[in-house]
Amino acid sequence: MSDTDAAPHKFLDITHETCPMTFVRARIMLDRMNSGEVLEVLYQGEEPARNLPQTATEQGHQILLHQPGRLLIRKG
C-alpha cells in the first residue's frame, strides 16, 4: 500500500475558510497529531492550493498527495 492509499488519521474540511485561516486551522490540527500521522485536508480556492502545501513543507511536514481541493499531509 502506498502513502496515498493510507487511511488518514484526521480529517479537516476548510472549504468555507479563507487565508490565512486555512493554514491556521490546518496547523492547529497538525499540532494535535503525532509525528507520522496523516491529515486529509479539503480546501477550496487558488490561494490555499498554493499556500497550504508550501507552508506545511516549510513546517517540516510531507505532502503525500496534492489534488485540486484535497491534500494528504504526513506530520513531520
Image (spheres, helix red, strand yellow):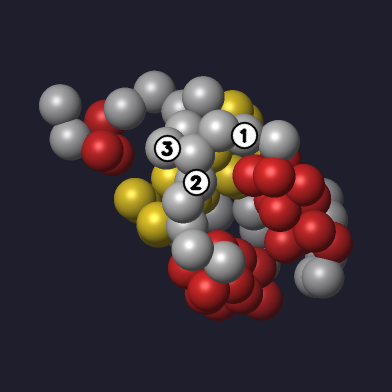
Looking at the picture, which amino acid does disc 1 mark? Met
- Distance, label 1 to label 3, CA atoms, is 8 Å
Q: Is residue 75 left or right of residue 25?
A: left
Density class for disc 2 (Cα within 10 Å; few <14, some 14-19, many ≥20) is many
Q: Position of residue 1 (x, y in %)?
A: 15, 26
| Distance from the alpha carbon under mark 1 to that under mark 2 | 7 Å
Q: Could you tell me if the residues under marks 1 and 2 are in contact, i.e. CB atoms within 8 Å?
A: yes
Indicate which disc residue 75 carries: 2
In what element is the residue under mark 2?
A: loop
- Does residue 40 appear left or right of residue 45 in this picture? left
Sequence-wise first label, 2 or 3: 3
The label shown at residue 36 is 3
Name the N-terminal-most of marks 1 and 2: 1
Where residue 22 sits, quadrant-wise, is bottom right
Q: Would residue 38 be seen by someone viewing this image from the given angle?
A: no
Q: Secondary structure at mark 3?
A: loop
Q: Are marks 2 and 3 in contact (CB under 8 Å)?
A: yes
The image shows residue 8, relative to residue 31, as above or below, that is: above
Mark number, residue 59? none
